[in-house]
Image (spheres, rainbow, N blue to C red):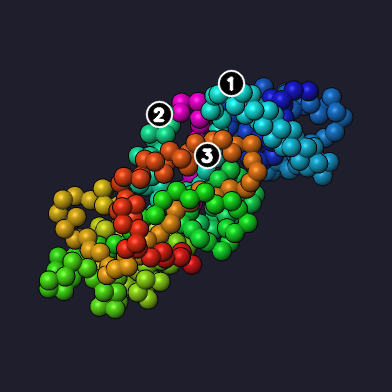
Amino acid sequence: MNIQQLEYLIAVDKYKHFGKAAQACFITQPTLSAMIQKFEEEIDVKIFDRTSHPIRTTDAGMQIIEQAVRVMDEVMELKNKAHLLNNIVSGKINIGIIPTVSSFLLPNEIFDFLKNHPKIELNVKEMTTENVIKSLKSGEIDAGIISTPYSAAEEFFSDFLYNEELLIYSSKKDLAKEGESYVIPEDIDLSKVWLLEEGNCLRAQAECICKLKENEMGPSNLEFRASSIATLVQMVDKVGGLTIIPEMAIDELTASQKEKVFHFKKPYPIREVSLIYYKPTYKQKLFDELSSFIRESLKSKLIFNTHPQDFVGVKPE
């Protein structure tokens, strides 16, 4: 019996398929099958029912898998402690990030973080806030980056990352009243607003700011649900109307598009973004490094950090 065999057991239980499990473990299927069969013979317990499709974990096997997961957690904690003693930050983090954050954070701050920490491996998945919560509870991911506070995430530890302003992106370059540089929420034409699909926290925040409703733009036979901010920007450019974008999206806009960005009237609405996870955890050092890096990287980039008195938070739900 060895640690590799436990890894293979957990992989087969997860994927319910020997081929997919072998691929995830970077070994051949015959090798994985042989190692698991040897393990079953050694402990004299049938862990998997190979006659079913997909493969089923037996009742006795489920108890073995549960113990194997606990053992692997202890092994990872042991490795992490050893790295700390050697002052080495390394390990793997499975993390879920909401799409309205990942598209801006991933190619910038997170990529830079990995360059500075080559011994840390990140497995990143884009997920809605609801799926981040579900995946954390099931153990599929170690942490999530979402907009906070969020009532369903109260059981998790929340590590603040940054605040960013929520802005208006409009096809009208004269959206603000004459002589003003801001827009009053009550003055917005609610029939000309593009929103993200249900399940995105930015949609809920947009609705909260000025009681927005689904748009009535475009052809009458078009039912449209956007899943990304980039798509919303394109719809405003092509069809007209307006949408709500986070401050970090501005860097992705062209010079002419930046002229279509407007502030709301003070206090400016902001959203808070945090890293959430169960605590205590043996990956605490990795989370601390990631959180600290993102906070420091964005400290001089976001307006809130220089004039916090001008902002008010908007809850995602």
Q: Which quadrant: the N terminus?
A: top right
Which residue appears at 84% of the width and 41% of the height?
A: 60
The type of residue carrying mark 3 is Asp
Verify CB contact (< 8 Å) between mark 2 and mark 1: no
Disc on res. 86: 1
Apparent side of residue 140 relative to residue 196 in the rendered image (left or right):
right
| Foreground of the two, 221 or 243 | 243
Disc on res. 115: 2
Q: CA distance from mark 3 to mark 1?
A: 17 Å
Verify CB contact (< 8 Å) between mark 3 and mark 2: no
Apparent side of residue 285 relative to residue 61 in the rendered image (left or right):
left
Q: Assign a secondary structure to mark 1.
A: loop
Which residue appears at 55% of the width and 24% of the height?
A: 87
Which range is magenta? 117-128
Asked whether the viewer can see residue 278, the reply is: yes
Which residue appears at 42% of the width and 34% of the height?
A: 113
Q: Looking at the picture, does residue 132 appear above or below residue 12? A: below
| Foreground of the two, 21 or 164 | 164
Binning the other alpha carbons within 10 Å of mark 1 as few (below 14), some (14 to 19) or many (20 upward) gives: few
Q: Looking at the picture, does residue 167 appear above or below residue 99? A: below
Q: Looking at the picture, does residue 314 appear above or below residue 65? A: below
Q: What is the x, y in percent for residue 108?
A: 35, 39
| Foreground of the two, 245 or 138 | 245
Q: CA distance from mark 3 to mark 2?
A: 17 Å
Q: What is the x, y in percent for residue 298?
A: 36, 44
All told, the count of numbered labels is 3
Q: Quadrant of residue 212?
A: bottom left
Q: CA distance from mark 2 to mark 1?
A: 20 Å
| Foreground of the two, 15 or 94 | 94
Q: Assign a secondary structure to mark 3.
A: helix
Among numbered discs 2 and 1, the one appearing first in the sequence: 1
Which residue appears at 49% of the width and 58% of the height?
A: 148
